[in-house]
Amino acid sequence: MYARHITTGLHAALQDTPVVVLHGARQTGKSTLARHLVELGHPATYITFDNATALGAAKKDPVGFLAGFDGPVIIDEVQRAPELVLPIKADVDRNRHPGRFLLTGSAHVMQIPRLADALVGRMEVLTLRPLSQGEIAGVREGFVDAVFAQDPPRPPDGGSDRAPAKCVGGLAQRIVAGGYPEAVQRAEEDRRRKWFEAYLSGVQMRDVRELSNIERLGELPQLMAAVAGRSGVLLNYAELGRDVGLNQVTTKRYLALLRATFIVHAVQPWFTNRIKRVVKSEKLYFTDTGLLAHVLDATAEGMASDRKRTGTLLENFVALELVKQVAWSKTQPTVWHFRDHRGHEVDVLLESPGGRKIVGIEVKAARTLNTEDTKGMRVLAEAAGDRFHRGIVLYGGDEFLPLGRDLFAMPVAALWQLGAERVP
């Protein structure tokens, strides 16, 4: 079992919050983590609604079902029994004991009927994403906190006790393997392809239908392919719909389902009054680059000869690694993207709570850099003013290099090496 860095936050939530929701994509390890908590001593009864008998009992008599449990309860795949929402609320209102319910789900909590409204002020929500590169390697990444630190970032010291264990595998292999635990463990590409095929079929036929009650989902694979081709590009519903012959209403509805089942992740635009005209469209990324590579039919070998596709996959890879790390960072920044009306952009923008500090992250696949590669960062620095703390260009080279005042170039591997600590 992989050590999941979100576990510390999960333990903390169970100590002071009556209802803790752990949601995320199917097959990211939610059930494994929940059962592991029980093995470690969390005094809860584990129930899964993959069990038809348990699901039937909860749906038939939700009040009586909950009454059968005296202590803390873990309910796995809770989205399948929305009838439990109000009885859970009533139970918590009678006894606001911390850790009373741990609910897991493969659908976004906001999509579960009445759950978000009924449990406001009573629950904390955590998202378990596919494995980060540090989790795969057995280290806890500290990149996010390191780039927000007062001192300039320095290359990891290979002799330090804080240095990560050696990570095996090239960058392209990491990208196409992704972070779903079972896919990562399949070394053979054809076996991994079979897993992704089964995964997409399962999500479409089971989870999406449970959420939407849509009988005709034949257009969804085509839409998913179109989104994959536009990963990291500003979202335009009209253009995306035209690519697959859908109107905007249907396109938005299907995209909402892909978000609700954690297939795609949206990054919102950052803007400031210093720039009157900015582009305010969001960007969509796949939650997992292995899944993205599968949809694009991209291989590690093929990435070497397709620069455009490599750029798409690499930006998606970096953006989601940062999203994962934010969950356990001390800084807890918000993730944005930046683009002005002239086309100057920064792939990822990290903003500390209260907007006091801003760090820009640009992604370049090339092994060498030039002045054009920091143009967007300089525009961002001007827009952010005193709040601009640092700019980082993650690139395909091997050196840590200063590029100007508060601007640094780092290898992409710095994502899981800079500030990393070995997991005990």
Image: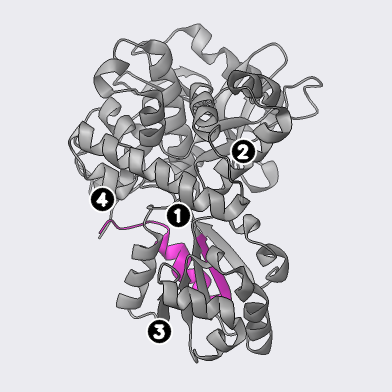
Q: Give the camera-side residue of 232 and 52.
A: 52
Q: Residue at x 49, y 41 (%)?
A: 263
Q: Which residue carries the number 3 mark?
A: 43
Any magenta on residue 168?
no
Element under disc 3: loop
Whether residue 178 sits left or right of residue 230 in the image: it is left
Mark 2, Cα crowd under 10 Å, few <14 / some 14-19 / many 20+, is many
Q: Is residue 54 left or right of residue 94?
A: left
**What residue is pinned by disc 2?**
254
Q: CA distance from mark 1 to mark 4?
A: 17 Å
Dot 2 and dot 3 residues touching (CB under 8 Å): no
Q: Which residues are magenta?
A: 1-22
Left or right? Give the position of 282 relative to 140.
right
Residue at left offset 73%, top offset 34%: 249
Mark linked to residue 138: 4
The reply to whether discs 2 and 4 touch (Cβ–Cβ < 8 Å) is no
Query: Disc 4 and disc 3: Cα gap in Å?
Result: 27 Å
Label located before the other in sequence (3 or 1): 3
The residue type indicated by label 3 comes to Pro
Residue 118: quadrant of the picture: bottom right
Label 3 – label 1 distance at C-alpha: 22 Å
Q: Hey, what amino acid is under mark 4?
A: Gly
Residue type, numbered disc 2? Tyr
For mark 4, give the secondary structure. Answer: loop
Task: Give the number of the mark in front: 1 or 4.
Answer: 1
Nearer-N-terminus badge (1/2): 1
Q: Secondary structure at mark 1?
A: loop
